[in-house]
Image (spheres, grey):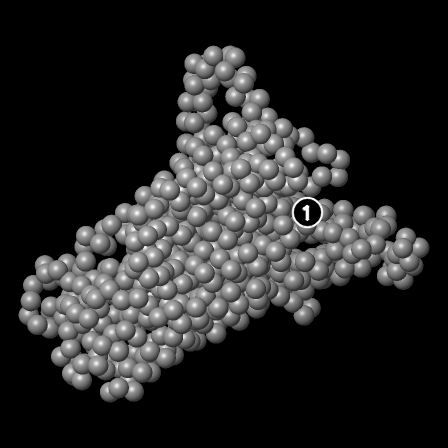
Amino acid sequence: MEYYYIAMLVFLAGLACFDLFVGVSNDAVNFLNSAMGSRIASFRTTMWVATFGVLLGATFSSGMMEVARSGIFHPQMFNFTEVMIIFFAVMIADIVLLDTFNSLGLPTSTTVSIVFELLGSAIAAAAIKLYWEGGSLQMVFDYINTSESLTIISAILISVVVAFISGAVVQYIMRLIFSFYFERVYPYVGGVFGGLSITAIAYFLVMKGARGASFMQPEWIEWIEANTQMLVIALFVGFSILFQLLILVCKFNVFKIVILAGTFSLAFAFAGNDLVNFVGVPLAAYDSFKIWMASGAQPDDLIMSGLLVSTKTDTFFLLASGIVMVFTLWFSKKAHRVLQTALNLSSQQSDHEQFGSSIPGRVIVRASMGLGSIVNQLIPGAVKKTLDSRFKHRRLKRGEVPLPFDYVRASVNLVLSAALISSATSLQLPLSTTYVTFMVAMGSSFADGAWDRETAVYRISGVLTVISGWFVTALTASTLAAVVCSIIFLGGGFVAFLLAILAFILIIRSNMRFKQQEANYKAEQAIRYDVNKIREILNQRVGENLLTTVTLYNNIVETFLNDDESGLRKLKLQSNENFDQLTHERGIYYKMENSGFVPTKEDNDARYSYFRTFTNLRDVGRSLQALARLSKDHIANRHRTFQGELSQDLADLSQLLLEIVGNHNGKADVAALHANAQSLLARIETIQEKLLRNGPDKGFSARGCELFLSFLLFARELINHYEIIAMLQQKLNATTPETQDSSKVQSA
């Protein structure tokens, strides 16, 4: 029996390492994006600062481990076997949840997921136990630490609102003081700003977080608490004087100290608050095992009251976890790539938005604009002019690269996020560091005017998406954990073994999926301002997309004529995916760079051909998307399908298109379509004329005629667009690689 539980612990330890890797890979952006976005220090410097923050923060997370031990359920209501099953089910559910959400591309929070997995698993275990013992299911919540659970859940939800409002208010005040031309005010108030920032970091991280440190002695904590006020005043005055001297005498940029200290503090706060999400459950299981081994009792007879005793987690385990986090931070390719994600929503630039628009977002923007116009009328003109002058964006100098945000906003994002998270950690309340840092960044960007009429609807939709993701994650996590816990209770050790195998399969699959994504990412990065590379890509993708498009068109026609609604729904999804892929590939045009040489005219022409080609492919994809939707709606509304000779003409046309382009190793023959273009267009014209002459007599309604014409119009658009694409390819292929290579040598 002992070896069974040892095997469970080994399995939980392995999952903890995987959780640490995945969590840090996804959440590293939370404490790195502001420093990277402001570009105040090099990548390596920022990484080293974050490294020390993570290592030290991990040792301050001991107090947070109580959340997994007794913060969600009452351990004294369960025996050792039941507690181990609860912990085991939580980790299995966590792996499945992370894999599913990553596969669907949905945002998730490790804090929300672990809290609600513990809640769902404990409720399921309590319900099964009551059922077996003949008790009333109304007693389920006697097993749950409802007061503490509600406090934790409320804190997570309220933190989202508090973070946004705090970010907006603090950033607005800072911008009124500094303006976007902060260099003018900085020499006079920079020292006070730096002193206030460093003091806030020291107060929230060290003084408030001292109780959670595994190495702190009780007398040290008592001394800090007794002298907190004196320490805060001394730190503020001392750092303000020091920084002001550095500014005036040494011309030193104090923002560099503030931003790097903020990066350290946020990495510290992240490790201190989020470590429980990754290793809290395995450590609680390990403590349970030690209590059982020391008791000598049977696993089903030992009541786990020992988990109620507050203990300091071994510093070795915390440091080991911190080391795993640090290695992930340095060597995870995903952690490095994900940095750009959080910069999009807070950037002043609006070339690309991470989220689309939504109806609630549009409603909020419209209402806000109306309210804003009323407020503007109430504010005196002189006051409004003064306020506007403080928010006037600076003009970029020639050759200056625009930053996602400046030093002022980067400082606010870091210091405020760290303060909020550290405050919660000192109260032993787990927060979603992802949501807090995201909402602070949203609030500061809102106050800075980054949400203009071009971007506001996307930014608000993004905020609403994150908030709704909180509820989706909570519901999914609790339900999944309850199901897994029930299966293990009913199936026993053999089922637990099968679920463990399933978890490792999902881990392997997730790793393979990321490798494929990494390969695709590298392939995109390899696309350069180079005629040879662009020619190779277009010759491959044009043929592939033509085959995909004609096949989808033929399938839509065939499925529509068979009156198959479910089949049309699948084809509609496929056409949407095709359009999204083409949109993504066209967007690569904006990311193209040269390969270190001066681009020739042929290189520039190739880049132009790339954009025009994918624009035409995208137009065809959009038309196919619309046709699939119209066809599905027609069948879903139970309208009549096409019958008779005209129906056969449409089927023959789609089949003829498929036969002409053929399938040559996954690519269609674009030249064959070009050669048969005129005959195909003439055939389409004949079918259209037949429809307009005989359609009403053949039982076609006005709605049916319009849809039939849409099928013909798509075929016509397909041919016309690929005629343009064929000409672009001919022109591009006329530039031989040898000629291009020689021109590059001359340019060099």
Q: Name the residue under label 1.
A: 590
> Which image quadrant for residue 135?
bottom left
Q: Is residue 89 visible?
A: no
* Residue 302 image offset from top left, x and y in percent: 15, 77
- Left or right of 534 on screen, residue 377: left
657 or 338: nearer the eye?
338
Residue at the (39%, 71%) spot, across then down: 317
Q: Which amino acid does label 1 sit on?
A: Tyr
| Label 1 Cα crowd, 10 Å radius (few <14 / some 14-19 / many 20+) | few
> Which image quadrant for residue 63?
bottom left
- For the C terminus, the quadrant is bottom right
* Residue 248 image offset from top left, x and y in percent: 63, 35
* Residue 367 image offset from top left, x and y in percent: 41, 27
Residue at the (77%, 53%) spot, across then down: 594
Give the structural element (helix, strand or loop) at label 1: helix
Judged from this view, the residue extending furthest toward the top is 381
- Left or right of 519 on screen, residue 514: left
- For the N terminus, the quadrant is bottom left
Residue at the (33%, 68%) spot, across then down: 313
652 or 258: nearer the eye?
258
* Residue 21 image offset from top left, x and y in percent: 47, 66
**304, above or below 251, in the image:** below
Label count reads 1
Residue at the (32%, 79%) spot, across then down: 8
692 or 665: nearer the eye?
665
